[in-house]
Amino acid sequence: KGTTKDLSGLNGIPNIRYYYVFLLFAYIISVLGNTIVMAVICLDRNLRTPKYVAVFNLAFVDLFGSSALVPKAIDIFLFNHPSIPYSECLTFLFFCYTCLSMQSFNLVALAYDRLVAIIFPLHYKVKVTHRFMFSLIVSFWVFVILGNFIAVGLITRLSFCESVVINSYFCDHGQIYRLACNDNTPSSIIGLMFPVVNFWLPLVFILLSYLCIGCTLAKVATIQQGLRAFKTCIGHLSLVAIYFIPLLMIFTLKEKIDPDVRIINLSLTSVIPPMLNPIIYVLQTQEIKESVKKLLKIRWKSKKTIRKKIIM
């Protein structure tokens, strides 16, 4: 029950050291990018809208998730510390799964925002309020945290005959419960429910929301109006594609994928979205671009004023 866990997921993969360099690069970009997005939303009052409550939360989840996963993974595999204490392994599992789940549900919140904004534009400010978005985000956090507490609690009931080698890059729930010596049925049920609740249902909701958006634009809008409305969805669609497509390939192909390729793909799914999400929002969201320009302009002017005062 309190055995040591060894992580072996990235060992034995050719030229893996170059991948560690990429992980570190991705982590640095993720930290800088998501910190900038959060700072811009906090500093600019024009961005304190319900939509940007969800964007801020996504940046926070990306920053938190990257910090929970990447430094520990680099320490384990690059500096050859594969053994991880039982309690630390469960903590690692909890935070990684919590952040992965919240990324998915956060995309649902942003999809709902786009759905209401395009289909019910006149009722948008009534239907999507600060209170509603806060309540939605908080309910997602509560649901995800409770679900992962249950998953971790069931893992603590399992017994392991000896030190366990987990073939993954983090303390993967499925890899752990399958190695137990006693009955793991409750954990296996949770393992089956997790992708359905945290992956398939959010993806179905997002796809249905865009189907509704497409049908609405086709019926009531001119081509120019449709393109203008659809342009507001490009950033969100990019985030959805980056997050869901790799997971969709992994879940559908399953055993057909080489184990090493599967581990690399899963790890990329954990690090690529947090790195690219802030870049996509800064480059493709006009409000954030304008806000960044405005904040940089104010900062440049203040520096110029300080220099003049020093010279005088």
Image: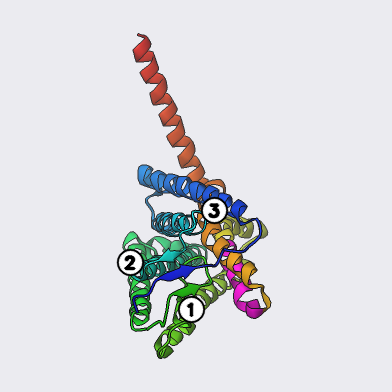
42 or 73, which lies in front?
A: 73
Measured as percent of width and height from the top left, residue 88 is found at 36, 66
Q: Secondary structure at mark 1?
A: helix
Assign the N terminus to one quadrant of the image: bottom left
Say the numbered circle drawn on residue 174.
1
Measured as percent of width and height from the top left, residue 59 is found at 43, 54
In magenta stretch: residue 247: yes
Measured as percent of width and height from the top left, residue 64 is found at 40, 57
Say the numbered circle drawn on residue 23.
3
Q: Earlier in the sequence, mark 2 or mark 1?
A: 2
The relative height of residue 286 versus residue 262 in the rendered view (above or below) is: above
Residue at image position (51%, 43%) is 289
Q: Secondary structure at mark 3?
A: helix
Label 2 belongs to which residue? 138
- The amino acid beneath tag 3 is Leu
- The amino acid beneath tag 1 is Gly
The crowding category of the residue bearing disc 1, from other C-alpha atoms within 10 Å (few below 14, some 14 to 19, many at least 20), is: some
The relative height of residue 139 versus residue 182 in the rendered view (above or below) is: above
The crowding category of the residue bearing disc 2, from other C-alpha atoms within 10 Å (few below 14, some 14 to 19, many at least 20), is: few
Distance from Cα at disc 3 to Cα at disc 2: 30 Å
First to last magenta residue range: 240-255
Distance from Cα at disc 1 to Cα at disc 3: 23 Å
Assign the C terminus to one quadrant of the image: top left
Quadrant of the image occupied by residue 242:
bottom right
The relative height of residue 260 versus residue 57 in the rendered view (above or below) is: below
Measured as percent of width and height from the top left, residue 274 is found at 50, 56
